[in-house]
Amino acid sequence: MSSSATVELLGITPNAERLIEEAGRTCYLSFDKMGDDSHKRFIRMIIKNGHHSVLEHASATFRIKGGSRSFTHQIVRHRMASFSQQSQRYVDEHGFQVVTPGSIEQNPEALKVFNEAVAHCREAYAKLKAMDIRKEDARFVLPNAATSEIVITANFREWRHIIDMRTEKGAQWEIREISEQILKELAKHAPTVFEDMAQA
Amino acid sequence: MSSSATVELLGITPNAERLIEEAGRTCYLSFDKMGDDSHKRFIRMIIKNGHHSVLEHASATFRIKGGSRSFTHQIVRHRMASFSQQSQRYVDEHGFQVVTPGSIEQNPEALKVFNEAVAHCREAYAKLKAMDIRKEDARFVLPNAATSEIVITANFREWRHIIDMRTEKGAQWEIREISEQILKELAKHAPTVFEDMAQA
Amino acid sequence: MSSSATVELLGITPNAERLIEEAGRTCYLSFDKMGDDSHKRFIRMIIKNGHHSVLEHASATFRIKGGSRSFTHQIVRHRMASFSQQSQRYVDEHGFQVVTPGSIEQNPEALKVFNEAVAHCREAYAKLKAMDIRKEDARFVLPNAATSEIVITANFREWRHIIDMRTEKGAQWEIREISEQILKELAKHAPTVFEDMAQA
Amino acid sequence: MSSSATVELLGITPNAERLIEEAGRTCYLSFDKMGDDSHKRFIRMIIKNGHHSVLEHASATFRIKGGSRSFTHQIVRHRMASFSQQSQRYVDEHGFQVVTPGSIEQNPEALKVFNEAVAHCREAYAKLKAMDIRKEDARFVLPNAATSEIVITANFREWRHIIDMRTEKGAQWEIREISEQILKELAKHAPTVFEDMAQA
């Protein structure tokens, strides 16, 4: 089964592929070679040649809702990206949602164990709050399954790297599914930059 | 009460303050000014003048045991550092330890709620494992309180930044206590670099 | 006298201040506080509180023409930015332009010395090229004064940092003048983010 | 002919390969597998599996003398490294040394042109200084060929990346020769980490 996370494109560099060409041709002062479709040829050339730094001039921002804290703990390890994440220190989590792994959802017994554990955590959180324990301490009983909203901005080179690492076979299922959604969005808006990955 | 986390210095640049001087004097080719204690004057000067990049030539590595997943999720946001962290995908967590916030430990009723929630999570994890749910999925029921071992390497400039941000009043208590322990260790081995912070 | 460099804004995040608010409110899930002008209050608050990471979600790209290689060697030291620079390995530099420092331009004798040196370098470059010395080797006779076009992309947090460091009294005059031009452009398009610097 | 640059190892993480193993086994809590030579097997495994972040826990610092400003302008583009470089703003460059490209050195006519240009630059610099032009402005007549001392610290992952990019066929000869010298030093002190590159 698939993650319930939703991926929303909040912003992306306008005319991104054109900007990449304009920036990248600075290295060669080859602006005279620019024409209607020249950015496609240029971008394919720099990707093929490994001149990926040029792709850093464009970036995209996504809002991801419904990812678990396991997912966010992994994704924030990418250091060339910018994150704003729902803080369990400041947000009251009494009504927290959870991500249920597919292997658990498909197994009625496992699902029962999982749901009971989540319910117990929820109840404990509410009780601790009622005893005037601060949010930043009460959250210690929240499970990894709890969702955490996050906004991520990265440049295209870094998105290529993240997608490359996180959509491969060995990647954990939740981060893989979210990365695949991100790739789909990026391929719509910057088809030449992401075409090799989207077809893979 | 204090965090039960332990901080162990695994490695540090040998003769770190001398190396910083040797590297930093390259900017001015002022090697003729080097003497027995000249590194102290030099380091105080560059810190005062904001020429902090020179401090990047030395680094230190710490192993932190007994920090919670809340702590690790915060600390890995520092991007100029290197992390190797206990993976809940690969490590069997059936015997996981927990961090109990002081506000809970001092409140018998709250402590009871907390301990029961932790016990329930532990039991649920064991049951899911017994049903052949993989570790990477079973861990969704583990609480933030679960400890996670982590090794962190950062250069001295970044350690100064981390300590600066994480020991201030508004910082969360667990990351503050761990940062204070780190500062104590660093001040022993590179007293001039960290003296202003250690005395603060 | 002022640098002859020109600064052109190639691209900037659309509705940048709004995007910053949308991203930043994720930390608190405080979207209900958004209104027509709420982004101004929000941005002033995060800048005051030192929560600058939120500013990373917006970025701007500039093309700088007419800066010297001394300037570019300094500016590329900023590591949280992306650069595409005119390459002396690939571009024929026989007609290179130069930056003349004001202190030299205002001193007729010095100007004569400077112009003769530049002319000699230009002639040597042409002769070496005529002897089939490759561009990447002939360039060794080019002076620091030679201009080098560069495109720079950085997020708003990093632009604030660059401007902060490079417009201060002790900064070198060329990088200071260029940074001031960049600040002017940024303050036009993201007035709240840069107002405190623009008024300084 | 070869660059006249010298590469001196100023510092390196003591017992670097052992530290990498100690840090890296944290991910799996597999410390029980550590033995006399286990770090070799462990490091080969993580390199093969692409788990390169573990290599970041060790670092090395080099002093490079006799590299040209062309070289330094290239090398400082590597962003995951730390640099302290001889500053032409602060150091009097009247006696500057130069790097002579091999293609010029082997061609007597070219060498004459090159040497005359360098001599002219040197003379112009001295004259400007004698007219009380400040170092930061007089340096505009210095050629790319002028040497610039630099100290570089990077972690092993980044050194692998730098060496990978800078020793390949298409790399410029000066940066290639210096990178090869760096690789030789690193392979002496951390043979397992760099063996695949040293044999290539």
Image: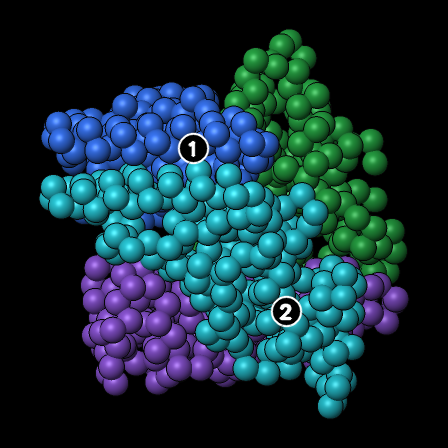
Chain colours: A purple, B green, C cyan, D blue
SS assignment at label 2: helix
A30 and B21: which one is in front?
Answer: A30
- Point out the residue furthest to the bottom here: C36
Q: Quadrant of residue A28?
A: bottom left
Q: Is residue C105 left or right of residue C125?
A: right
Q: Is residue B155 above or below residue A171?
A: above
Number of the label disc, if any, that sits on residue D124: 1
Residue in view at x 42 percent, y 32 percent: D124
- Point out the residue furthest to the top here: B36
SS assignment at label 1: helix
Q: Is residue C135 above or below residue D115?
A: below
Determine whether label 1 and label 2 are within 8 Å by CB: no
Question: Does residue A155 appear anywhere in the picture?
Answer: no
Residue A195, x across and y down, in percent:
26, 77
Q: Chain of mark 2?
A: C
Residue in view at x 21 percent, y 59 percent: A49
- Badge 2: how crowded within 10 Å, few (<14), some, or many (20+)? some
A154 and D62: which one is in front?
Answer: D62
- Badge 1: how crowded within 10 Å, few (<14), some, or many (20+)? many
Residue D51, x across and y down, in percent:
36, 48
Amino acid residing under circle 2: Lys
State the residue position of label 2.
Answer: C184
C6 and D134: which one is in front?
Answer: D134
A71 and D57: which one is in front?
Answer: D57
Q: Chain of mark 1?
A: D
